Amino acid sequence: MRDGFVARYQGAEYDASPDGDNVRLYLPEPAEGFTEVRPGRYVRVVPTSEVEDICYIRTTCTWRDQPFIVLAEHEAWLRVEYTGGRAPVAKELGLDEFDFGVYQGWAPLSEVVDLRELRV
């Protein structure tokens, strides 16, 4: 499940993080031009002008007939955030109030439908 920036650089797509005039590109394995910043995380900083495309990808789904953003995946569960904007509905679903008006919870993958990535 992806939720974050991606950039196309030299024909390949990378997880990314814009940073002013630069973009940080990330890989889970070593590659030429990438520096290990922690085990399993490699970064390369390139000028924004050299990036072919950058966008934000958000994974969405429907669970129990309600709209959600997918934040993470663990085994057969998805960490989801309710986007329907109705607190009583969120509470009926048993979601936790993560922040004021922000409701999150874990949904069984087997109950989730309409799972898709959106380029924002």
Image (spheres, rainbow, N blue to C red):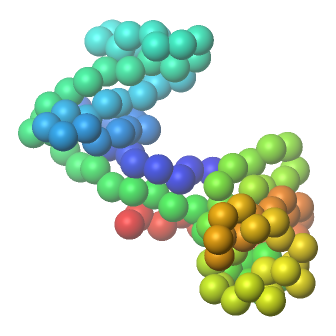
* Of 108 and 92, the residue lying toward us: 92
In the displayed structure, 112 sits above or below 53; it is below
Q: Is residue 10 visible?
A: yes
Q: Position of residue 76 (x, y in %)?
A: 87, 50
Q: Is residue 68 visible?
A: no
Which residue is at 75% across, 68% downward? 97
Q: Position of residue 94 (x, y in %)?
A: 90, 73
User: Image quadrant of residue 120?
Assistant: bottom left
In the displayed structure, 39 sits above or below 44; it is above
Q: Position of residue 78 (x, y in %)?
A: 78, 56
* Of 104 and 72, the residue lying toward us: 104
User: Image quadrant of residue 59?
Assistant: bottom right
Which residue is at 63% across, 86% downward? 85
| Drawn side of residue 36 relative to residue 45, left or right | right
In the displayed structure, 65 sits above or below 68; it is below
Q: Position of residue 15 (x, y in %)?
A: 43, 38
